Image (spheres, rainbow, N blue to C red):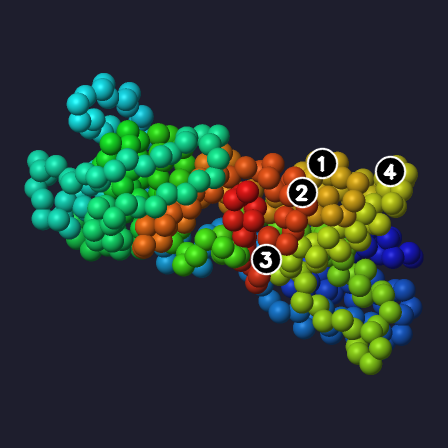
Amino acid sequence: MTLDELLLEWSYRSERGYPTLDNPSDVSILKEILTKLNLNEEDVSSIIDELEDEPGGDDLTNPGTDGMEDSDVENEKEKQVQSKPKSEPKIEPEPESEEEPQNTQTGSESYDSVIRRHLGLNEDQPIPKSKNSYPFPGAGGATFDIQVKSDDMKYWKDFWELTPPKEGKTEGGTKGVGNGEISLYWLYHHSNSNINVNDTRGADNPDLKFNGVGVEVKAYDKHQGKHGLGRFGQDVEQLKMLGVIFGINALAKQFQPKPEGKKRAPKDVNPLTWDGNNLTSAMNEVIQFKTVDIDQLAEIYDIFAQIKSNLDFLDKRLGDYTTASEGARKMALEFIKPKVARKPGDGGFLTNVLINGDCRFWQIDYDKVLDNKDALNHIKASQGAMQVNFEELFGK
């Protein structure tokens, strides 16, 4: 049996149709296959011991059990939409021009109530307006910055930690709203910017919508560097693709010569933990694997027809690619797509707000990832959590 044939058999005897390093059943199947190859017991045991020493990861068999982000804010957002029907916010027509323009559009009753309660206002008393107007380019606009003006900073800071009460409650706060979210809502909606801002927070919705365009609000301490975009345990198809890619890569490494003076290279690369270089290297192994003439084997053996089906699935999701680097960039985009497609969506904005009023709006454009030859240096996975450098991917 060649290495290619071994990879094929292991993949399609596994429970999920692709092998994973943290599944005892998959490891047992590999041990059975290796034993039939008449390898000596020491080599088989060495391979299996190393596989079984692989650290455990997320629960990949139950989509959604990992949550979204490792923050109380995002965990709470998931809970809030479990029993709520999804609907688009109503966008009212723009008000007619007046001497002092007023934003008479719907806004958020919940956020307005929080602001009024915080300021001690009655329901019929107007909420103070920001003194300045701030730009928003709308769908298709480019990445941009704003700086909250000094005469708006009092309320910006005052509203920074405000949160609405849990649904059905009138007091207390919910962790489903992060720092700066109500500040940003107030800055745009209660102003002369003529922007209708709605809160649409929830597990599958952006935090806000500006004239119908999704805006996901973060409060990282800086705009630069890699930031956590949350866990990806619910993105089952992406995990399947990564499982195939890194499963092939892991097994191929086992048959390479052992490093001098060591048992084998440490297996700290897997579907839940990798960087751009790891992904490129693994895609190179996949390219080598695809040189097997599976079509001919599929005409003889049913199991190879199933193998071809899974490879077709991978090709359909990634499309054409000729190099490992190109294929890795396509996989990296597939990796982040489900998260940003939900919040804020292609063409929407991911916004980082600082308490000093410095705000960066990154416009989400998938093409920027594919066209950026350096993109793989700015996307990685660490123990089941996604890390992305938004400035390097979407800021240029």
* Mark with earlier residue (2, 4): 4
Mark 1 against mark 4, which lies toward the viewer? 1
Q: Nearer the viewer, residue 19 or 164?
A: 164
The quadrant of the image that shows the N terminus is: bottom right
User: For numbered disc 2, what is the local secondary structure?
Assistant: helix
Residue designated by label 1: 319
Identify the residue shown where x is 45% and y is 30%. 139
CA–CA distance between discs 2 and 1? 8 Å
User: For numbered disc 1, what is the local secondary structure?
Assistant: loop
| Residue type at tag 2 | Lys
Quadrant housing residue 126:
top left
Quadrant housing residue 102:
top left
* Mark with earlier residue (1, 3): 1
Tell whether label 1 touches label 2 (CB within 8 Å). yes
| Residue type at tag 3 | Ala
CA–CA distance between discs 4 and 3? 34 Å
